[in-house]
Image (cartoon, rainbow, N blue to C red):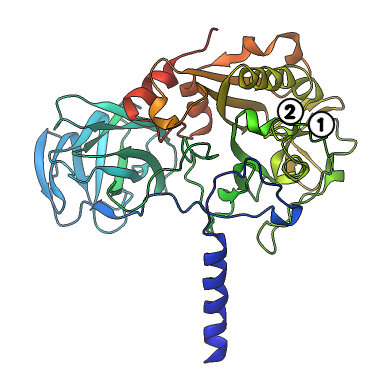
Amino acid sequence: MRKTLLPLLIAAVAFLTIFNSCTKLENADVQKSSDITSVSSNYKTATVNLSEGFENASKTAYTAATVSLASGNWYFDDALIGNSTTDRKNGSNSARIRNTGKVTMQFNLANGASTVQVKHAIFSADASSTWELWMSTNSGTAWSKVGSTVSTTSTTLTTSSFTVNQSGNVRFEIRKISGGANRINIDDITVTDNSGGGTVPGDNDNLLLGNPSNATSDLINANNYLMVKPQYCLSYSNAKHTPNWTSWHVFSGDLGSAARQDDFRPDATLPSGWYQVVASEYSGSGFDRGHMCPSADRTSTIANNSATFLMTNMIPQSPNNNQIPWANLENYTRSLVTAGNEVYVISGPAGQGGTGSAGYATTVGNGVVVPAQTWKIIVVLPNGNSDLSRITTSTRVIAILMANNQTVSSQAWGYYRVSVDAIESLTGYNFLSNVPLAIQNTLEAKVDNL
C-alpha cells in the first residue's frame, strides 16, 4: 500500500508546487535558486461546453441539409457523415467535407467559449487541403475567423486547438477553403466554456496577451512545455532544445543599473531526465547564444538579469542577426519604454537551418536546432492600468520576421516588418488570444509603418 501511495503523494506535492502565478516580480530581488517553473493559477477553469463526435447520425450525400446530432442541429453544405473504412474517425463516424464545404452549428452556446479543439485528417488517399474555424456571436448573422488557417496533410487524425475567450452566445462553423475536390475528415469537436472561475492574468503579467501554443506543464507535452519564471514565460521544446516562444512585459521599473551577468548556464528546472543544454555547446559553431528575453530588459536586480542567461532562453542566432538588426530592435523597444510606454513582447525561432559566421548548420552542440528565421511581436501601450482593456484597433503592434543568416544585417530592422497574421501562418500559433477577437483580427492584419 505504501508503494502505491508514495508516487501519488509525490505527484500531488509537485502539482501544488508548480501551481503558482506567472506574474513577474518587478522589483523583488529574486535569488538564482528561484528560477522556478510554475503554472499560472489565473486562467479560467475549463468546463466542456460541447463535445461532438458525429456518432448515431446519418447523412450519406453532399447535398446541403440540416442534421440532428447529439449536441444539436448542424448544417452540412457539401459535406456528409462518413463511416467508410477510408474515413478517418475516432469511433464509427466523422464529418467529411469537399470543395469549399461547411459544417455549421445552428444553435448557440450560452456560456461562451474559451477554447475549441478539432481533430482532422485527409480522407482516403486524397491530397492536402486547408480549412478555417469561424465564429458568430449573433446567431449566425455575421461571422469572424478564429486563429490561423489550418493545413490538413496527414491521414492520421491530428488535433488543432484554438483560443477563443468569448463570453455570451457563440456558435462555430468549419469552412474548407482550398484543395478542391480533395476531401477532409473532421471529428471530435470540443468546446470549453468561458464561465469558469478565475480571470485572465492581471496587468504586467508576462502572459497577459495569451498562451499562443496552449503550452502546458504536463510532462507528456515535452515539445510544448510551459515554463513560468518571474522574469519571463516560455514554451520549451525538448526535441529542439530551444524555446518555441518566450513572452515578457517591460516597463520602466524593469530598467535599472544591474550589470550584465554573462552567467550562461543550464536550466536546472527542466523536468528530471530531460537534456539540459550547457553554455559551451555553441562554442565554435559560428552562432551566438541569442537571448529571447534580452539581458538589458531585466536590469532592475542582479538576479533578474541573471535569469535571462539560462539556456532555455537561448536560440542559435547568426551574429549579424543577433548583434545588428535584432539588437537595434531591442534598443528601440527599450527607448519606447523610457519614453513613457510599457510593452508586451513575444519572440521565437521558426524553421530549421541557418547560416552563421562558420557557415550553414541545422544544429549545434548536442542537437540544439538552428532556426531558419527569428520573429518578434511587440505590443506598445502608454503607461497605465487595466492593460488588456486599453488595447484597441489603434494600438501599435510591431511584428518582425528576419532570416537567421549573415546577410540579414544589410537592412535595418524596420525593413523586416510583417503582419502578426504572417507570423501566425508561419508558426501555427495564435497570438494576442486574450484580446477581444474583433480587435485581435484588426491588429493582426496590419503591418507597422511608424
Q: Nearer the viewer, mark 1 or mark 2?
A: 1
Instruction: Report the front residue among 77 and 39.
Output: 39
Q: Quadrant of the C terminus?
A: top right
Where is residue 178 drawn, in percent x and y? 34, 25
Which type of secondary structure does the marked residue at label 2 adopt?
strand
Question: Splitting the image into 4 quarters, where does residue 146 fall?
Answer: top left
| Residue lying furthest bottom | 1
Where is residue 202 drawn, in percent x and y? 46, 41
Instruction: Report the front residue among 180 and 366.
Output: 366
Identify the residue at horizontal 48%, vertical 34% (top origin).
428
321 to the left or right of 185: right
- Mark number displayed over residue 354: 2
Per the image, the residue denoted by label 1 is 287
| Residue lying furthest right | 284
Identify the residue at horizontal 44%, vertical 21% (top origin).
444
Identify the residue at horizontal 12%, vertical 38% (top origin).
106
Whether residue 296 is visible: yes
374 to the left or right of 168: right
Within-10-Å neighbours for mark 1: few <14, some 14–19, many 20+:
many
Identify the residue at horizontal 24%, vertical 42% (top origin).
112
Question: Splitting the image into 4 quarters, where does residue 398 fall?
Answer: top right
Which type of secondary structure does the marked residue at label 1 adopt?
loop
Where is residue 286 drawn, in percent x and y? 85, 30
Q: Name the kind of residue labelled 1 in the image.
A: Phe
Question: Splitting the image into 4 quarters, where does residue 102 fall?
Answer: top left
